[in-house]
Image: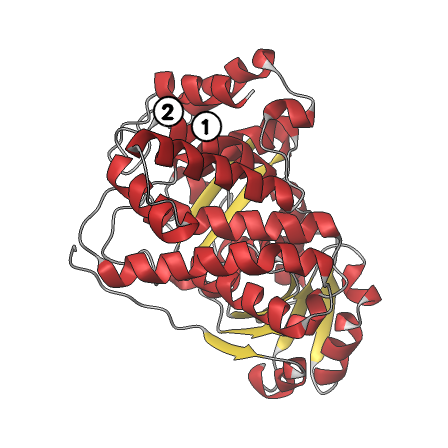
Amino acid sequence: MHNFDFHNPVRVLFGQGQIATLSTLVPEGARVLMLYGGGSIRANGVYDEVKTALAGHTVLEFGGIEPNPTYETLMRAIELVRAERVDFLLAVGGGSVIDGTKFIAAGALLDGDPWSIFEQRAANIHAALPFGAVLTLPATGSEMNSAAVVTRKATLEKRAFASRHVFPRFAVLDPTKTYSLPARQVGNGVVDAFVHVMEQYLTTPVDAKVQDRFAEGLLLTLVEDGPKALSEPENYDVRANLMWTATLALNGLIGVGVPQDWATHMIGHELTALYGLDHAQTLAVVLPAMLRVRREAKRAKLLQYAARVWNLTDGDEDARIDAAIERTEAFFESVGVPTRLSGYGLGKENVEPVLAALEAHRLTKLGEDRGVTLEVSRKVLELAV
């Protein structure tokens, strides 16, 4: 294992009824901007619970943050923050709302265009407004990390940044608030968390036994409880396990000291920016194809994954690898997420624009060994059609 410094300052409040603790978590006297997406938080009671908990605070609101938060919308929120002298942000929703809030928190304190955060790889972030999160959709892990992804509609770009200044101060996770999620969002969340783990686990062996077994435990939990969340939507234990798994998948813990991949994510971001696919849908399409194309570079870990996650231990090594990738695809399909571009109305003619975008964004040496060149990305996408 490599040397590492694991730093995560987020306080997590987990369980039914925890939204009420907001009254003590948000600083007294703060001018709070509550940020959210569509109308779901009103339908499931989260909106009312948050407003009740913050009855003693000055609370402004900003709704309409998209499932892939856009720069254009977030800039309107930044204008509001500045005009109203907001000094605390509260993200109420899924990973997109939390990602957007991170951009607002940093961008509101910057001179000049906040898009420069991406152009300067967050080196120009020296401070951010404090914020907390109330999570309603387990998927991205954004509630316990310092990374965010933002889409710019005008240029069809989807870009990521990370900064230690944009860790949430706290995250409230109540599994009962996920009961009413549409099946599509539940399935997407399961796939998103699964691929987050895979990007940090299925690379090359470095004898990191603890990190490997953490990762395998998370994968096994998703395989076991993902389909149950769809068939038993109000099973508290299932929802709680999924919620905590999605958080642990990307809070940094399983990634310390080990190689990380992220090629699937980078290609997926371009698919979302160009064609509007859900983030998890792109991951379900790209990951199996990526594993097939990169099977030799990933052989040792693929065999470990086959044995420990899918219990494939007998017979020819190549047959075990094939079966493990097929099981992965079948699992994604079992939670309602298609694994081919054709499942979303896309074909071979849609490959070239993705490659052009990867090249324009200098994403031409991806993966744990920088071995995912444009030519490898082409093979992956063509195989995923």
Place residue 321 in its image quadrant.
Answer: top left
Q: Quadrant of the C terminus?
A: top right
Task: Give how far across and how far down residue 141 sits, in percent.
Answer: 50, 59
SS at mark 2?
helix
Within 10 angstroms of label 1, few (less than 14), some, or many (20 or more) residues? many
Q: Nearer the viewer, residue 7 or 25?
A: 7
For label 1, the residue is 289
Q: Which residue type carries mark 2?
A: Val
Task: Give how far across and how far down residue 346 sits, in percent.
Answer: 64, 20
For label 2, the residue is 293
Answer yes or no: is residue 235 visible. Answer: yes
State the scheme by which the image is colored: secondary structure
Which residue is found at the position 29% from the left and 34% from the top? Answer: 317
Q: Nearer the viewer, residue 46 or 326?
A: 326
Image height check: is 26 above or below 189? below
Q: Are marks 2 and 1 in contact (CB under 8 Å)?
A: yes
Name the disc covering residue 355, or none. none
How much space separates mark 2 and mark 1, taking CA atoms? Answer: 6 Å
Task: Give how far across and how far down residue 360 sits, in percent.
Answer: 43, 22
Answer yes or no: is residue 123 visible. Answer: no
Q: Residue furthest front?
A: 315
Q: Which residue type carries mark 1?
A: Ala
Task: Give how far across and how far down residue 277 sits, in percent.
Answer: 64, 34
Which residue is found at the position 60% from the left and 87% from the top? Answer: 28
Which residue is found at the position 78% from the left and 60% from the top? Answer: 40
